[in-house]
Amino acid sequence: MDFKSSSVTADILNYISDGKVHTLQEIADEVEVSYSTAKRHIQSLAYRYPIETFCGGINRGGVKLDTKYIVQGKIITNEKLQILGKALALLQGADDNEVNPRLLQELINDFAPPTSKETKNEDQQEQVN
């Protein structure tokens, strides 16, 4: 991959990292590339990042990067979230004076996998917005 191509990819990733739905044309205009170039880069990024694409309808079509699964540029899959949740729960139950309970609770809030109720609430909030 040459410098220009990696620069376009980085620019696209930066633009869609807000978690909002963007049309391919908006992305192409923002990064100053053609529609087909933007589409090709989005397809390439979708192999490494949790990118969703929508075709018209309620979501008006477009591209969205699911930011819930990205921490410091790395993807956290549902399986990894489940393991993290279990590990944090075990750590919470241990009698270890070296662990700050407030920080542990923050980690649990940040990395525990969402419950089905939380997922439904998030979906309803996204539909309202």
Image (cartoon, helix red, strand yellow):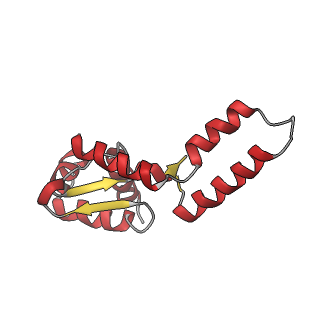
**What is the x, y in percent for residue 43?**
32, 67
Q: Is residue 99 above or below residue 5?
A: above
Does residue 92 show up? yes
Numbered disc total:
0
Which quarter of the rendering shows the N terminus?
A: bottom left
62 and 111: which is toward the camera: 111
For the point 56% across and 42% down, the residue is: 110
46 and 93: which is toward the camera: 93
Relative to 109, 65 lies left or right? left
**What is the x, y in percent for residue 29?**
17, 48
Relative to 29, 19 lies left or right? right
For the point 26% across and 56% down, the residue is: 63
**What is the x, y in percent for residue 19?**
34, 46
Does residue 11 show up? no
For the point 52% across and 62% down, the residue is: 78
**What is the x, y in percent for residue 31?**
25, 48
Q: Is residue 13 above or below residue 53?
A: above
Which quarter of the rendering shows the C terminus?
A: top left
42 and 55: which is toward the camera: 55
- Considering every residue shown, the one lying at the far front of the view is 117
33 and 125: which is toward the camera: 125
Quarter of the figure with residue 55: bottom left
For the point 20% across and 56% down, the residue is: 62
